[in-house]
Structure formats: C-alpha cells, structure tokens
C-alpha cells in the first residue's frame, strides 16, 4: 500500500539532514496546496538551488501599477510595501538574496489563468480559492484579508450599516476579484455591478460619481481614503461568513516543483513571527472598520 504524502514527508524529515529549514516545515492547516502538488525533499529545496525559470534567479511576478500599501512608488524591486517585503523574505528563506530576485510584470487576471507561467511565483493580492486551484497552485496563505466598501462621504452608500443597505446602490469592483464575488454572491444588488479591468478605473468611477461605492480589500480601502480619494470613507467591512478566512497566497504554475518549497518558506515566516512583523510595519493603518451585518 503506498504511503500518503504526509507520511512520506515525516519520513524524510526524520532521516535526512535538512539543507533548508523550510524544506520540511509543517504545512499550515489552511495550506493552499492542491492534492496534486509535489512533496518537497531536502535536496529539492536546497538554498539557492531550486529549479527556477531562470538559472540562479528567482523570478517574481506582479501587476503594474503596483499599488500601496502592498508596494511603494510602483517599484516592487525597492523592497518597500508589504508584498515586496514578503517576496524578498520568501526569496531569502529559499536562498536567494535581493540581487538574485528578478521582477516581471504580470496582469492580475493572467497570474492565475490556465497555462505555463514565466514566473516562479506571483504576489499580487490573489486570494486562494477552489476555482483558481483548478488552474494554478498556491502557497499557504501569507495574509488573512477582509473585503471592504468605500464610498464618497456624500454618497447614499456612505451611511450603510448592513449588507442589505447596499442592495439598492450602484457598486463596482475589479474584474476577476473576490471583491466582485462579494458583490454578486453576498450583496446581490438590484443593479448589475460595474466591472473594471483595474482598481484605478474603479477609483476614477467612484470619484466621478459613476458608482455609489466600490469594494476592495481592507488595507487598500484605507489607503484609498487616506491618500487618494480623501473625500471618501471606509463604509465598513464584510464579515467572515464562511468560517475559514480569505487568504492571499503566492501563485505558482500548476505543475511547479517549487510549490512545497515556497509553502515551507511561507509557513516558517509565519511561525517565527516575520509575517506578523511585516504586516505591522506596512499595513498598520489598516485598522478595524465597522462590520456590515
């Protein structure tokens, strides 16, 4: 009878001297790995020795513009912003120093579309979902996220206290996002939501009064209202109704040999407090917002 993956992994950890701590780090219970992901071995996760897209380099994808607070100055390579910092922390845990990380522009929807990838992993606020797992692999989650509603202070949506209060307002969100899923699946508004290719277009529509409110993730909502659309407010956040928190995960090719190694790196960063520290440093303004009941 063949051994299951967990048994194999435990056996490897007990008999092989690890070259990398991340290689056999326990997987999170919320791991985004699919059943078809390959197990990591000590040798396959050896620091700086991964079978990457470009030899000796770790290629990381993200969209452009790269928004704050996830990135700063539209420059993922500067190490500033939460996701840039997480990417470099993961790279370092895998044995790649900053000069060995190459950034590549990847449109949001392309990152989790079916097909071969030109990046080793992509980081761009991509939520782990069963539907996306059919096309790509995910690391375990590196951030628990809530969706939030942003409206101009003069908008009729600004006074919403409940999900039902949003039913008769015009809402908008970026295409392919869980923000749009929350509108369609939870709010179920009377009017068809406006859909935009990028959050920039959604913000312009909000400023121009083409929509009453937009839905984005909570840290982005606080950035928009604090720095970009200052006459807007965070109306509230959606409750976690599913029991399992929505999480952002690193996106990998469906057949990537790196998935278990990257997951091990993310799990070790969570376990030693690095992710919490980076979240406090770069997302500290994302404070509590009222929950829309």
Image (tube, rainbow, N blue to C red):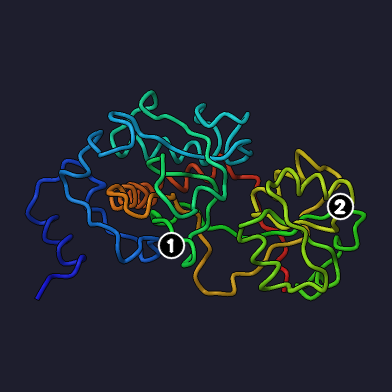
On the image, the x and y values in percent for residue 260 come to 29, 53
Alpha-carbon span between mark 1 and mark 2:
36 Å
Q: Nearer the viewer, residue 16 or 5?
A: 5
- Residue 133 is marked as 1
Crowding around mark 1 (Cα neighbors within 10 Å: few <14, some 14 to 19, many 20+) is some
| Residue for point 35% across, 60% down | 33
Q: Nearer the viewer, residue 290 or 81?
A: 81
| Residue for point 77% across, 63% down | 193
Residue 223, quarter of the rendered image = top right
Crowding around mark 2 (Cα neighbors within 10 Å: few <14, some 14 to 19, many 20+) is many
The residue tagged with tag 2: helix, strand or loop? strand
Q: Nearer the viewer, residue 94 or 59?
A: 59
Drawn side of residue 101 relative to residue 69, left or right: left
Q: Earlier in the sequence, mark 1 or mark 2?
A: 1
On the image, the x and y values in percent for residue 195 come to 73, 56
On the image, the x and y values in percent for residue 229 come to 81, 43
Residue marked by disc 2: 152
Drawn side of residue 223 relative to residue 78, left or right: right
On the image, the x and y values in percent for residue 179 come to 65, 60
Locate the C terminus and report the quarter of the image it occupies: bottom right
Locate the N terminus and report the quarter of the image it occupies: bottom left
How many dots with numbers?
2
Drawn side of residue 40 relative to residue 114, left or right: left
Q: Mark 1 against mark 2, which lies toward the viewer?
A: 1
């Amino acid at each position: 009878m063949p051994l299951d993956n967990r048994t194999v992994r435990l056996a490897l950890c007990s008999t092989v001297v690890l070259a990398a701590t991340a290689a056999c780090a326990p997987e999170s219970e919320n791991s985004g790995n699919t059943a078809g992901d390959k197990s990591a071995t000590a040798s396959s996760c050896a620091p700086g020795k991964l079978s990457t897209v470009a030899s000796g380099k770790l290629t990381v994808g993200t969209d452009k513009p790269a928004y704050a607070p996830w990135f700063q100055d539209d420059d993922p390579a500067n190490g500033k912003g939460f996701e840039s910092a997480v990417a470099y922390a993961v790279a370092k845990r895998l044995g790649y120093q900053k000069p060995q990380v190459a950034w590549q522009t990847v449109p949001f929807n392309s990152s989790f579309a079916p097909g071969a990838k030109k990046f080793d992993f992509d980081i761009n606020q991509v939520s782990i979902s069963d539907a996306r797992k059919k096309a790509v692999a995910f690391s375990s989650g590196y951030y628990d996220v809530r969706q939030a509603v942003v409206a101009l202070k003069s908008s009729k949506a600004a006074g919403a206290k409940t999900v039902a209060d949003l039913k008769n307002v015009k809402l908008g969100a970026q295409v392919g996002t869980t923000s749009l899923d929350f509108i369609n699946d939870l709010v179920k508004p009377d009017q068809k939501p406006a859909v935009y290719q990028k959050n920039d277009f959604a913000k312009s529509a909000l400023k121009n009064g083409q929509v009453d409110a937009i839905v984005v993730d909570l840290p982005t909502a606080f950035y928009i209202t604090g720095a970009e659309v200052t006459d807007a407010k965070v109306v509230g956040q959606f409750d976690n109704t599913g029991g399992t928190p929505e999480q952002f995960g690193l996106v990998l090719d469906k057949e990537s040999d790196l998935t278990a190694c990257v997951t091990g790196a993310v799990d070790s960063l969570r376990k030693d407090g690095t992710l919490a520290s980076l979240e406090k440093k770069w997302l500290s303004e994302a404070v509590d917002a009222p929950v829309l009941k």
